[in-house]
Image (cartoon, rainbow, N blue to C red):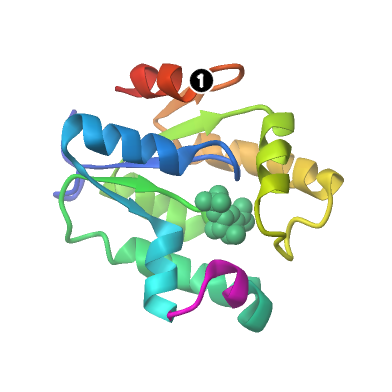
Amino acid sequence: GTMKRGCDHIFFVGFLGAGKSTLARNLGVLFNRRYVDTDRLVERRRGLSVSRIFELEGEQAFRQLETEALGSLACDRSLLVSCGGGIVETPCNIELINQMGYCVYLDGDIDDSLRQIRRRDTRPDFRSDEHAARLLEHRRPLYQQAADFTVDIRGKSFKEVTYLCA
Ligand code: S3P
């Protein structure tokens, strides 16, 4: 396709536990492209883990850092970018993503996400399954708005999703 603002990144969005990072990493290895994760960029900028930032400074501070991290990619070339699950909560991030490249939404099942979430560190913003389910319903149209393509990942293995996106 045509280049957007001199950038041709590929962004992956989707709910927590959708496998964005693993997929971006797999595709990076397959296509010899650099892979970044917005959560890791934020952690590097702030010198704190995501969960510590939430704990000490709150979600708003985290979202600010997330937007800065995203903006910092404007000068790089051809990255695969795994985005934090809440990146679409900040309206200007959707614009940034659309300006900087193409976006793939990994649309998964809430139960699969909940299983993944339970395996990770508890985070202040994911107190209960009900809360997570509501959050996904709220975000789904935002993910769709950000995305150029949606991939239905329900019931698919990492390998299947990797080759679907490749
Ligand atoms: C968040 C998802 C996390 C991380 C932060 C907030 C969210 O990213 O950015 O904990 O609000 O959904 P992953 O989806 O990469 O786990």
**Residue 51: in sight, yes or no?**
yes
**Residue at 76 percent of width and 46 percent of height:** 132
Q: Is residue 101 above or below residue 50?
A: above
**Residue at 67 percent of width and 77 percent of height:** 55
Looking at numbered disc 1 in the image, what kind of residue is underneath it?
Ser
Residue sitting nearer the eye, 39 or 138: 39
Q: Is residue 77 left or right of residue 47?
A: left
Q: Is residue 19 above or below residue 93?
A: above
Query: Quadrant of the image for the C terminus?
Result: top left
Query: Quadrant of the image for the N terminus?
Result: top left
Residue span colored magenta: 47-53
Q: Helix or strand or loop: what does disc 1 sit on?
A: loop
Q: Quadrant of ligand 1?
A: bottom right
The image quadrant of residue 90 is bottom right
The residue under label 1 is 157
Q: Is mark 1 within 8 Å of ligand 1?
A: no
**Residue 89: in sight, yes or no?**
no
Residue 16: percent from left, percent from top: 60, 45
Residue 113: percent from left, percent from top: 67, 37
Residue sitting nearer the eye, 145 or 127: 127
Residue sitting nearer the eye, 96 or 164: 164
Residue 116: percent from left, percent from top: 65, 41
